[in-house]
Image: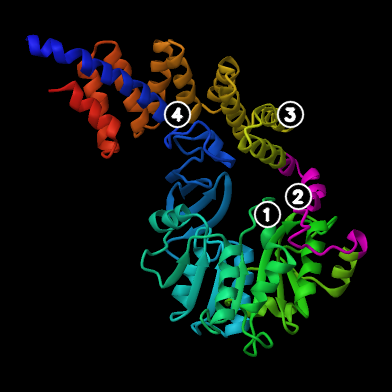
Amino acid sequence: MTARRDLWPAAAAALALLFLAALWLACAPDGTPSARLGSRLLLRDAPSEPDAIYYAETQYQILTVTAEPGNPDHRAFYQDKLRHSEVDLHDITDLKYPYMRVYDALVTRIAGPAPAPVRLLLLGGGGYVFPNYLARTRPGSEIVVVEIDPGVTRAAIDAFGFPADAPVEIHHMDARNYVADAVRRNKEAPGSVPSFDLVVCDSVSDYSVPFQLTTREFISDVKALLKPGAPGGGGGLYVMNLIDAFRPGAFMNAVAQTFASVFPWRGAVSVTTDPDNRNTTVFAGAESPLDLENVLAWMRPGTAFEGLPFTDAQFADLASRNGECVLTDDWAPVENLLAPVVKADPIGQLTAALQAGIRAAEKEDWPRAIRHFRRALEIHPGDESALEDLAHALELTGDEEGALACYAQLVQLYPKTVLPRNRAAMLLARRGHVQAALEQWRASLDIQPGQPDVLTNLGSLAYQAGDRDRARDYWQRALALAPDSPVLQNNLRLLGP
């Protein structure tokens, strides 16, 4: 008994420290108070989309895959809160998005009807729907995908029907760096990177545009990777999609003129019959003209498509209204060019305010971030993302009362979302309001039982209250969900039999 009394103070101290560690781990799984930008600012511990079957927080973004109720083979892939792609696991050949049908039509025009193979470079993996489609419908194709986020690839394999052994060459790196490196390698050893039939840039996400993939210098490097000659006659084609509205169309005009500064021919296909509305447009560049008015004829039989190719008059109209504008590495004001269409779009205004707040938060300019998040709430009162971002920014500035008020509003507006309950419980526990924290964590578990961090924290609170058996039960349940957790392993080891 004497030895037991001697050992107990050290064990109790260790458990107390682990209690604090457990609370912090539930708050920030990667161990940092403010990890990165975008929705990562929130450090979510559960998906916000209903019907989620896959959820991961990567270095770059939040990834969620959902399954349609009653039709679980119909999946949707979210990057942050934007639905990026959809797929039917029973029919991978059913391309859900019109712009992908344009991609497929252009592959047919360049490489011939399926199953003729194609050599294609895709910049941006998304849900890997299109490379998966090509690998299945055109066996023997050489498909290279450049995707900066390895988490996107894992999500596509684990939950979106992309086979782990698919005959696709994948590079997890920045698209600009891959293209520059391929051009350099071909200069040093011609043919080390074989030329492509098509290069497709699918890296634009709503109004979020990686400007470095829009410039004349980048497109010139892409051109160097294409097979020389006329498209359909052995030559290659460069394809890029964007989101804009024809009026005012400032960004669309800049892309058109930048393409024209590199390629002898450029064209575009709108995926709708009314390009004046915000929509997706697919641009193409090649050594010689391509008869885009036949784009529907190149699609698979029975494909539904109502889009229209741009005419020379439309390109001239864009230029007359917006003036000369060629994007370069030294000058690519993409956000300014998109500003008019964003202002005309309430959702765009909300997105712009959120992104401005996130950029400020990335620089740890918390007062500015908070102003932008409050502005987002003025545009759309009660918006879930704006409230979550504002609450977390307030936390990081020490305004716990303000953060708790935001979480209380979230719980009222979105009672089935566990994030605000968990974050509120974290603050309440740190402030000594243990019973209130318990209520929120228990409610969170009722909504979503499989949360190891919440179970860990409940066990820690039970231990602090002297209920060792309940603490052990919570920690064992948490360990079953997170078997590699050193906090749980140590807690249970120190707790003893």
Query: Is 343 left, or right, of 271 in this rendering?
Result: right
Quarter of image, res 231: bottom right
Q: Which of the two discs, 3 and 2, labels the residue nearer the N terminus?
A: 2
Residue named by callout 4: 27
Q: Is mark 1 on a helix, strand or loop?
A: loop
Question: Dot 4: few (<14), some (14–19), or many (≥20) neighbours within 10 Å?
Answer: many
Outermost residue toward the right in this view = 320
Marks 3/2: CA–CA distance: 21 Å
Contact flag, marks 1 and 2 (Cβ < 8 Å):
yes
**Which circle, 1 or 3, is nearer the viewer?**
1
Q: Which of the two discs, 3 and 4, labels the residue nearer the N terminus?
A: 4
The residue drawn where x is 32% and y is 26% is 456
Viewer-proximal residue among 58 and 12: 12
Please identify the quadrant where the C terminus is shown. Answer: top left
Question: Dot 1: few (<14), some (14–19), or many (≥20) neighbours within 10 Å?
Answer: some
Q: Position of residue 446 (x, y in %)?
A: 37, 26
Amino acid under label 4? Cys
Q: Is residue 99 visible?
A: yes
Q: Which of the two discs, 1 and 3, labels the residue nearer the N terminus?
A: 1
Marks 3/4: CA–CA distance: 28 Å
| Colour basis | rainbow
Q: Is mark 3 on a helix, strand or loop?
A: helix
Residue named by callout 1: 209
- On residue 335, the disc is 2
Viewer-proximal residue among 419 and 362: 362
Q: Give the range drawn in magenta.
A: 320-349
Marks 1/2: CA–CA distance: 8 Å
Q: Confirm whether the magenta stretch covers residue 420.
A: no
Residue named by callout 3: 378
Viewer-proximal residue among 361 and 381: 361
